Amino acid sequence: MYGEKYTKVNRVLAIYEKFTRGDVVNKKQLSKIFGVSEKTIQRDIQDIGAYLDNYKKLTGNLINIKYIRDKNGYYLNGKDNDILNKEDALAICKILLESRAFCKEEIHHLINSILNQIDSTQRKYVNDLIVNELFNFVSLKHNDTLLSKIWDLSEFIRLRQVININYIKVDGVEVKRTLKPLAIIFSEYYFYLIAYFEDVHFDNPTVFRIDRITNYKVNGKKFNIPECQRFKDGEFRNRIQFMYSGELITVKFKFWGSSIEAVLDRLPTAKVIKEQDNKYLIEAEVYGRGILMWIMSQMQFIEVIEPIELREEIKKIIGEMTKNYI
């Protein structure tokens, strides 16, 4: 019991918080908790309902309070399904755990934050389904905290601020770079900053792994990109493989593996030009050399037709690989 010092404002806020978590609100139960009558709790619920009605008129958000007879209580009904439920929470938690994008400290924080948005019964169900996976979660080797860094870099992008960074390259050498930050993309375990170098005029963007950025700060300058040259991160993401940047090229290849669907999912720009006897002729626009890694992963079930330079490079790589087994 909260006692007399628990004011109406605090009580209404506490009840509203229960609603937003998806809890079923029972008048009799709350009257005992707060030490007030059931009529008082009923008035509190009506006040919250009136607030939601006004909120609906201002925003068009169709959220209201409904009574559930079989549970003898009230719940927050979102007609647009914009209230997090157990199915949503489970799916998001599964994606977070599978991505391994965050260190153990941040993954626990994120999952707890998500689970706290659903009611206690649903929370227990979801927690039971992920507890073993969470217990055995292994962070990536860098074990860096990323949430604040991602937010800061996102603000630099929004405000179009030029930044100075310290960056650890693949070979372990630390370098300094001055960048025009454009976008943040997640792929294959890592978050990446997409940016132009300050002294390059809208050339192909460069990719930086965010966990390798050891220091960053604004340098006081701002940049502007004409609308016609604005970086489109969605299109960039569809055309890049394994975050290897470079020139935009058109690749044409034959494929006769087990799943054409997997190819089209992996390469969002891919189009089937021709099909015959379960062999597909496919064309796709891609950035950089990441496509080479994907092609090699398809083993004997793929043949690159164009560009000729890529075809010849693959022949050379296969020849070098063959020497390893002779």
Image (cartoon, rainbow, N blue to C red):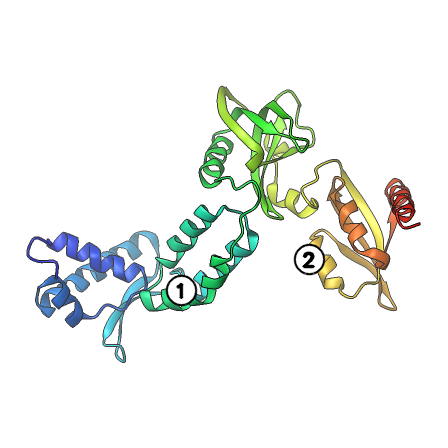
Q: For residue 181, say whether it is visible.
A: yes
Q: For residue 224, say whether it is visible.
A: no
In screen coordinates, is 248 left or right of 136?
right
Residue 275 place in picture, x, y as percent: 84, 64
The structure residue drawn at horizontal position 38% and vertical position 59%, both measured from the top left corner, is: 115
Residue 108 place in picture, x, y as percent: 43, 52
Instruction: Work out which residue is located at the far front of the displayed protein and give it.
Output: 326
First of labels 1, 2 by sequence position: 1
Residue 296 place in picture, x, y as percent: 81, 50
Dot 1 falls on a residue whose secondary structure is: loop
Examine the rendered structure and indicate whether residue 190 appears above or below residue 85.
above
Labels 1 & 2 near each other (Cβ < 8 A): no
Q: Amino acid at mark 1?
A: Asn
The structure residue drawn at horizontal position 65% and vertical position 42%, both measured from the top left corner, is: 236
Which residue lies under the disc numbered 1?
A: 85
The structure residue drawn at horizontal position 64% and vertical position 32%, both measured from the top left corner, is: 229
Q: How far separated are the C-alphas under marks 1 and 2?
A: 28 Å
Which residue lies under the disc numbered 2?
A: 265
Instruction: Work out which residue is located at the far left of the displayed protein and give it.
Output: 4
